[in-house]
Image (tube, rainbow, N blue to C red):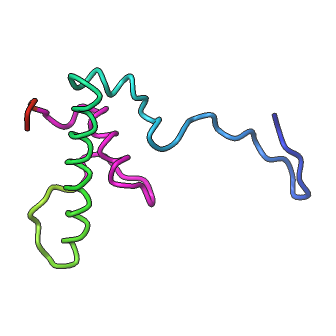
Protein backbone atom coordinates (compact mmCIF):
# COMPACT_ATOMS: atom_id res chain seq x y z
CA UNK A 1 0.00 0.00 0.00
CA UNK A 2 1.40 3.42 -0.96
CA UNK A 3 0.94 6.45 1.25
CA UNK A 4 0.30 9.78 -0.55
CA UNK A 5 2.03 12.86 0.91
CA UNK A 6 2.54 16.49 -0.10
CA UNK A 7 5.96 15.64 -1.57
CA UNK A 8 4.94 12.50 -3.43
CA UNK A 9 4.15 8.93 -2.53
CA UNK A 10 5.86 6.91 0.17
CA UNK A 11 6.51 3.29 -0.61
CA UNK A 12 5.10 0.58 1.57
CA UNK A 13 7.29 -0.07 4.62
CA UNK A 14 9.43 -3.18 4.45
CA UNK A 15 7.99 -6.23 6.20
CA UNK A 16 11.43 -7.37 7.33
CA UNK A 17 11.36 -7.60 11.11
CA UNK A 18 14.23 -5.93 12.92
CA UNK A 19 15.98 -6.71 16.17
CA UNK A 20 15.77 -9.98 18.01
CA UNK A 21 13.39 -11.57 15.48
CA UNK A 22 15.84 -11.23 12.61
CA UNK A 23 17.41 -13.77 12.24
CA UNK A 24 14.43 -15.92 13.30
CA UNK A 25 14.79 -17.71 16.63
CA UNK A 26 13.94 -21.05 15.00
CA UNK A 27 16.92 -20.68 12.66
CA UNK A 28 19.20 -19.84 15.58
CA UNK A 29 18.01 -22.84 17.59
CA UNK A 30 19.32 -25.12 14.82
CA UNK A 31 22.84 -23.91 15.68
CA UNK A 32 22.74 -24.84 19.40
CA UNK A 33 21.33 -27.59 21.59
CA UNK A 34 18.68 -25.53 23.45
CA UNK A 35 17.22 -22.08 23.85
CA UNK A 36 19.13 -21.74 27.12
CA UNK A 37 22.43 -22.48 25.38
CA UNK A 38 21.52 -19.86 22.75
CA UNK A 39 20.95 -17.23 25.45
CA UNK A 40 24.30 -17.91 27.14
CA UNK A 41 26.16 -18.17 23.82
CA UNK A 42 24.74 -14.91 22.45
CA UNK A 43 25.19 -13.04 25.74
CA UNK A 44 28.86 -14.03 26.03
CA UNK A 45 29.56 -13.00 22.45
CA UNK A 46 27.65 -9.71 22.87
CA UNK A 47 29.77 -8.96 25.95
CA UNK A 48 32.93 -9.59 23.91
CA UNK A 49 31.72 -7.25 21.16
CA UNK A 50 30.83 -4.58 23.71
CA UNK A 51 34.26 -4.91 25.36
CA UNK A 52 35.90 -4.65 21.93
CA UNK A 53 34.21 -1.31 21.25
CA UNK A 54 35.09 -0.08 24.77
CA UNK A 55 38.79 -0.91 24.35
CA UNK A 56 39.16 0.73 20.91
CA UNK A 57 39.69 4.13 22.51
CA UNK A 58 42.47 2.74 24.70
CA UNK A 59 44.39 1.20 21.81
CA UNK A 60 44.12 -2.33 23.22
CA UNK A 61 43.05 -5.24 21.05
CA UNK A 62 42.29 -8.02 23.51
CA UNK A 63 38.85 -8.93 22.09
CA UNK A 64 37.70 -9.75 18.57
CA UNK A 65 35.35 -7.27 16.94
CA UNK A 66 32.21 -8.08 14.98
CA UNK A 67 32.65 -10.86 12.42
CA UNK A 68 29.71 -9.62 10.33
CA UNK A 69 29.25 -6.10 9.02
CA UNK A 70 27.44 -4.22 11.81
CA UNK A 71 24.64 -1.86 10.90
CA UNK A 72 24.56 1.72 12.07
CA UNK A 73 23.66 1.79 15.76
CA UNK A 74 23.21 -1.99 15.85
CA UNK A 75 23.33 -3.44 19.35
CA UNK A 76 25.99 -6.01 20.31
CA UNK A 77 23.34 -8.67 20.98
CA UNK A 78 21.88 -8.27 17.48
CA UNK A 79 25.38 -8.54 16.00
CA UNK A 80 26.02 -11.69 18.05
CA UNK A 81 22.75 -13.25 16.83
CA UNK A 82 23.66 -12.51 13.21
CA UNK A 83 27.11 -14.04 13.74
CA UNK A 84 25.55 -17.20 15.16
CA UNK A 85 23.11 -17.37 12.24
CA UNK A 86 25.91 -16.87 9.69
CA UNK A 87 27.90 -19.71 11.25
CA UNK A 88 31.08 -17.66 11.69
CA UNK A 89 31.43 -18.73 15.33
CA UNK A 90 32.33 -22.17 16.63
CA UNK A 91 30.39 -23.14 19.75
CA UNK A 92 31.38 -25.87 22.18
CA UNK A 93 28.72 -26.97 24.66
CA UNK A 94 29.60 -26.21 28.26
CA UNK A 95 31.82 -23.20 27.54
Q: How many labels does the image show?
A: 0
The image quadrant of residue 73 is bottom left
> Which part of the image, by quadrant, shows the N terminus?
top right
The location of residue 29, given as percent across then percent down, is 31, 24
Farthest residue in the bottom direction?
A: 58
Note whether 82 is above or below 48 in the view shown.
above
76 within the magenta span: yes
Give the left or right position of residue 83, taking residue 9 as reference.
left
Relative to the observer, which residue lies in front, 9 or 52? 52
Relative to the observer, which residue lies in front, 41 or 6? 41
Stretch in magenta: 66-91
Q: Which residue is at 18% across, 71% downward?
A: 55
Q: Which residue is at 69% across, 41% downward?
A: 13
68 within the magenta span: yes
Give the left or right position of residue 30, taking residue 44 as reference.
right
The image quadrant of residue 72 is bottom left
Amino acid sequence: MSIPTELGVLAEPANTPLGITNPPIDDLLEKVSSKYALVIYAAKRARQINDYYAQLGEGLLEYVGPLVEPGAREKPLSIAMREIHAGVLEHTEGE
